[in-house]
Amino acid sequence: YADLAMYRAKESGRNNYQFFTPAMNIKAARRLLQQEELAAALDADRFVLHYQPKVDLETEKVLGVEAFVRWQHPEKGLVSAQQFIHLAEETGLIIRLGEMALRQACIQIQALERAGFEDLKVAVNVSVKQVMDAGFLDLFRQVITETGVYPERLELEMPAELLNEDPRHLRELLGALHDLGVCLILDDFGTGACSLATLQQLPLDAVKIDHCFIRDIPYNVSATDVASAVIALARKLHLTVVAEGVETPQQLSFLKGAGCAQCQGNLFSYPLDEDALIGFLVRQYERSLIS
Ligand code: C2E
Ligand code: MG
Ligand code: MG
Ligand code: MG
C-alpha cells in the first residue's frame, strides 16, 4: 500500500505539473507580449497627458490641473492609466514613462504661461518604484533645469503606499524635493495602512482623499462619516485637503461643509487634452469677468 500511495502522489504531482505548465506559459507569454507592446509604444511616443482642473472651493477658481497619462493605442483607442500603469510598474518601464510625463508636464506649464495662465499648477502622478529609484532626484533636477520651469508650479502626487518605505529615506528625499519648492501631495489618502507617525514627519503640503470615500456621499452614512473623519484628521495635521472623483452637487456641498479646500472630478470637468484644457480655462476666465 505504501508503494501505491507514493505512486499516486507522484502521479498527481505529475498531473499538477502538466496541468499547470501550459497555463503558466500562456500567462507568461501574454505578459511578455503586453510588456513588449508597452515598450514599443514608449519608443513610438504614443503616450500623452490629459489634464483635469482642480477647483478651490472657496473662490471656485481653477488653481491647477492634474495630469493623467493616456496611451494612444492604434486599435484600442485612448487607454487610461488605470489599465496599464500596473504593468509599467512591474516591468520597470514606469521609469521611462514617468520621465516622459514629468517632461510633458513642464512643457504644459510653459504652454499655459504662453496662453496667459501664469499661476496654474500642474500635478504629476508618480509611482512608488519611480520615486524610490536612485536616479529620481537627479532626474527631477535635470528636467527642471532643462525646461526652465519654476518647481513651485509643479506638484507631485505620491501614492499613500509610499509611506511603507523607510521613513529616514523618505524624510531625506521628500525634504530635498520640498526644498526645491515643489508641492508634495499624498494621493489615495485613507486607503491602505499608513503610518500617521511617518506622515507627520514628512514635508507634505496636501493630502488627496481617495475617490472611494467620495463615491457614496451622501447616501451612505458610514462612507460620509469616514470621509468627515479623514478630512478632520488631515486638517489636524495641518494639511490641505483635496477631494477627487467629485461627481455630484451633493458631494460638493458636503465636502465644502466638511472643510475640504479643493475638489476635482467629472462634476467640474473630465480630464481634457491640451487644446480642450486651454478652451476650458478661457471659458472659465470669461465667465469670471461677467460675474
Ligand atoms: P489617481 O491619481 O488617484 O487618479 C484618479 C483617477 O480617477 C484617474 O484615472 C482619473 O481619470 C479618474 N477620475 C477623475 N475624475 C473622476 C470622476 O469624477 N469619477 C471617476 N469615477 N473617476 C475620475 P486614470 O487616469 O485611469 O489613472 C489611474 C491611476 O493611475 C491614477 O490614480 C494614478 O495613480 C495613476 N496614474 C495616472 N497617470 C499617471 C502617471 O503619469 N504616472 C504614474 N506613475 N501614475 C499615473
Ligand atoms: Mg493623482
Ligand atoms: Mg487619487
Ligand atoms: Mg485613487
Image (cartoon, grey):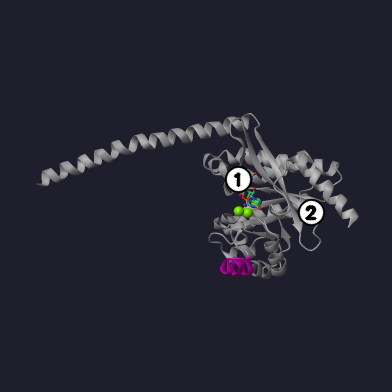
Q: Residue at x 24, y 41 (%)?
A: 13
Magenta stretch prevailing secondary structure:
helix
Q: Quadrant of residue 100?
A: top right
Q: Residue at x 28, y 40 (%)?
A: 16
The disc at residue 130 is 1
Q: Which percent across, then down, holds residue 14?
A: 24, 38
Residue 75 appears left or right of 53? left
Amino acid on which disc 1 is placed: Gln
Which of 172 and 116 lies nearest the eye of the viewer?
A: 116
On-image quarter of the C terminus? bottom right
Among the two numbered marks 2 and 1 on one chain, the one whose residue lies closer to the N terminus:
2
Q: Residue at x 62, y 30 (%)?
A: 43
- Residue 229 part of the magenta-drawn span: yes
**Numbered disc total:** 2
Amino acid on which disc 2 is placed: Val
- Residue 213 part of the magenta-drawn span: no
Which region is colored magenta?
A: 218-230
Q: Quadrant of residue 40?
A: top right
Q: Is residue 198 above or below residue 95?
A: below
The residue singled out by tag 2 in the image is 62
Q: Is residue 187 above or below residue 90?
A: below
Pointer 2: residues within 10 angstroms few (<14), some, or many (20+)? many
Task: For ligand 1, tell me if the residue under mark 1 lies within 8 Å.
Answer: yes
Query: In 3D space, how far apart are the residues under numbered discs 2 and 1 (Cα atoms)?
Result: 28 Å
Q: Which percent across, then down, holds residue 193?
A: 53, 61
Residue 84 appears left or right of 254? left
